[in-house]
Image: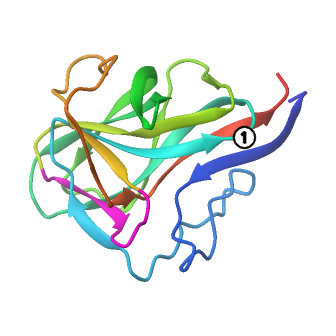
C-alpha cells in the first residue's frame, strides 16, 4: 500500500515485565508476558479506557483486547471505543467498533474488535477502550495491578451506539491489556 511506512501499534506495558508485543506483519506476535498481572471480571454497562499518545497519523485499525472466561454462564457484549482527550479526561467519541458477543465457554484469548469504517487519527492523546453490556462478569480482563498510570471508568448503559460523551468518570490503576493496531504513514 503506497505511503505506508510501518505497521505500528499502541499498547500499554509494564516496563519491568515487557518481553514482546504483537506484530501485525508476521501474525506470529505474542501478548506481553506480565508475571505480576491479575484478572478481574468485566462489569456490564461500563466503559473502561486507557490513555494513549499517537505520535503520527494513524489510518484504519482495530482494537485487540485479551478476554478470559470467568466460569459464569451467559453472554457479555463488548464494543471497542476511541475518545478524544479533553484536558486529561475522555472527551467526545471518535469511533466505535462493531459489537462482539463473548460467551462464557470461549477460551482465554485476544479478541479483535473492528471498526466498521476507515478510522483516521491525527497525532495526539486518545482514550482507547471497551464498553460492555449483556450479562455482567462473564468475561475477565487482564490488567497490571501495579500500574503508575490511571485507567478511566464510566457507568454507561449499553445501547445501540456508543455514547458521544461519558458521564461520571472515575479512575483506578488497573490498566487493561489491550491495543490499537493501525497503519502509520503519510496519507
Camera-nearest residue between 168 and 161: 168
Residue picked out by circle 1: 55
Q: In which quarter of the view is residue 15 placed?
A: bottom right
Magenta extent: 137-149
The quarter of the rendered structure image containing the N terminus is top right
State whether residue 4 is above or below residue 48.
above
The residue lying at 58 percent from left, 67 percent from top is 30
The residue lying at 53 percent from left, 79 percent from top is 17
Q: How is the image coloured?
A: rainbow
Q: Tell me residue 54's x, y (percent).
A: 65, 39
Q: Tell me residue 117's x, y (percent).
A: 55, 17
Q: Tell me residue 37's x, y (percent).
A: 37, 74
- Queried whether the magenta region covers residue 139, the answer comes back as yes
Camera-nearest residue between 115 and 172: 172
Camera-nearest residue between 35 and 117: 35
State whether residue 8 is above or below residue 183.
below
The residue lying at 15 percent from left, 41 percent from top is 44
- Queried whether the magenta region covers residue 99, the answer comes back as no
Per the image, label 1 sits on a secondary structure element best described as loop
Q: State how many labels appear.
A: 1
The quarter of the rendered structure image containing the C terminus is top right
Q: In this rendering, would 13 be left or right of 43?
A: right
State whether residue 128 is above or below residue 138.
above
Amino acid at each position: 500500500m503506497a505511503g505506508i511506512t510501518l505497521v505500528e501499534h499502541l499498547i500499554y506495558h509494564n516496563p519491568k515485565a515487557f518481553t514482546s508485543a504483537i506484530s501485525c506483519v508476521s501474525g506470529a506476535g505474542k501478548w506481553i508476558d506480565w508475571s505480576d498481572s491479575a484478572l478481574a471480571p468485566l462489569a456490564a454497562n461500563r466503559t473502561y479506557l486507557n490513555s494513549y499518545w499517537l505520535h503520527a497519523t494513524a489510518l484504519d485499525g482495530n482494537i485487540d483486547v485479551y478476554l478470559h472466561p470467568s466460569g459464569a454462564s451467559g453472554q457479555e457484549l463488548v464494543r471497542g471505543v476511541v475518545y478524544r482527550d479533553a484536558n486529561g479526561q475522555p472527551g467526545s467519541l471518535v469511533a466505535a467498533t462493531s459489537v462482539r458477543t463473548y460467551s462464557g465457554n470461549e477460551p482465554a484469548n485476544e479478541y479483535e474488535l473492528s471498526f466498521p469504517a476507515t478510522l483516521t487519527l491525527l497525532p495526539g492523546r486518545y482514550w482507547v477502550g471497551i464498553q460492555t453490556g449483556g450479562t455482567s462478569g462473564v468475561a475477565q480482563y487482564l490488567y497490571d495491578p501495579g500500574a503508575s498510570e490511571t485507567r478511566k471508568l464510566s457507568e454507561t448503559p449499553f445501547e445501540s451506539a456508543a455514547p458521544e460523551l461519558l458521564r461520571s468518570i472515575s479512575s483506578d490503576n488497573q490498566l487493561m491489556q489491550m491495543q490499537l493496531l493501525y497503519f502509520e504513514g503519510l496519507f
